[in-house]
Image (spheres, helix red, strand yellow):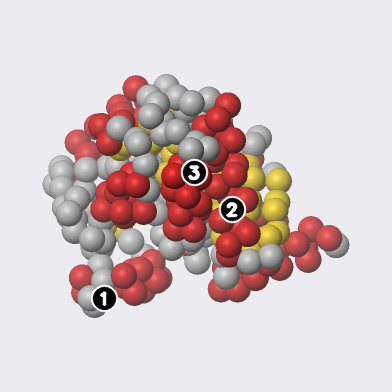
Amino acid sequence: MKFYCMENYDEMSKKAASIIASKMILKPDCVLGLATGSTPIGTYKKLVEWYNAGDIDFAQVKTVNLDEYKGLPEDNDQSYRYFMNDNLFNHVNIDKACTFVPNGLEKDSAKACADYNAIIKSMGGVDLQLLGLGHNGHIGFNEPSDHFEKETHCVNLTPRTIEANKRFFASEADVPRQAYTMGCQTIMNAKSVLVVVSGEDKADIVAEAFAGPITPQVPASILQMHQDVTVVGDKAAMSKLMDLLAK
Ligand code: GLP
């Protein structure tokens, strides 16, 4: 694993965006796996900035997102489709027909998951998967569990995740209780993985996930077994991990 400990959130965002941009320059028709959450917002901002400057081109890029809340329509401003349109897709020359997010409105979970697995397969694999990290070590919405889920599945969100995500909703009661998410095996199948982490409140979980035991109780820990993972964080989030690695 490669670790970059950046001075602050802005430097973290620039570094992460430069890794994505270099993939796009080397492979203009790359498949990007994308993530939501507050951490990657700065990364998307940088990509939009560089697109506006004429440095990168999304014309042939295809994207596949990690997850979506079950029950939220695309035009709900808390849906992950809305987030992606708002933070990236509406501002660049990507063909929206080539951007995929699980269908939150599909009530039949088995169908929603099978459809999404088929989409991921038809894309021929993800070149670069961007990930954030939940406070409990979740990636996408793969919550702590006694086993690693392989493919897209429907999850019951943990009280901790509902609590963490309620800041985006009018009240905790409005946070959906379930979500569709790519599984850990699908994430591990990506050729490269880029994790972004920011803030002191992530320092413990960053150290646990990347220097602790590999366990489904900390889903992100499985990334230690991937051959091409880059973790980019600000100092606040990386401090404990860097201390452990220096020992
Ligand atoms: C949500 C998303 C994750 C994201 C996590 C962390 O639960 N499903 O993909 O990584 O939140 O979010 P943040 O970056 O806001 O801390």
Q: Which amino acid type corresponds to the residue marked 2 in the rendered image?
A: Lys
Residue 198 on image: x %, y %: 57, 65
Rendering coords of residue 72 (x, y %): 19, 55
C-alpha distance separating marks 2 and 3 = 15 Å
Count of numbered circles in the view: 3
Between 141 and 16, the one nearer to me in the picture = 16
Up/down of 44 relative to 164, above or below: above
Q: Badges 2 and 3: C-beta atoms under 8 Å apart?
A: no
Is any atom of residue 187 visible in this view? no
- Which residue matches tag 1? 172
The residue under the point 37% across, 42% down is 92
Q: Which residue is disc 3 drawn over?
A: 53
Q: Marks 1 and 3: which is nearer the front?
A: 3
**Which mark sits nearer the N-terminus, 2 or 3?**
2
What amino acid is at disc 3?
A: Ala
Residue behind mark 2: 14
**How far separated are the C-alphas under marks 1 and 3?**
40 Å
**Is residue 161 visible in this depiction of the protein?**
yes
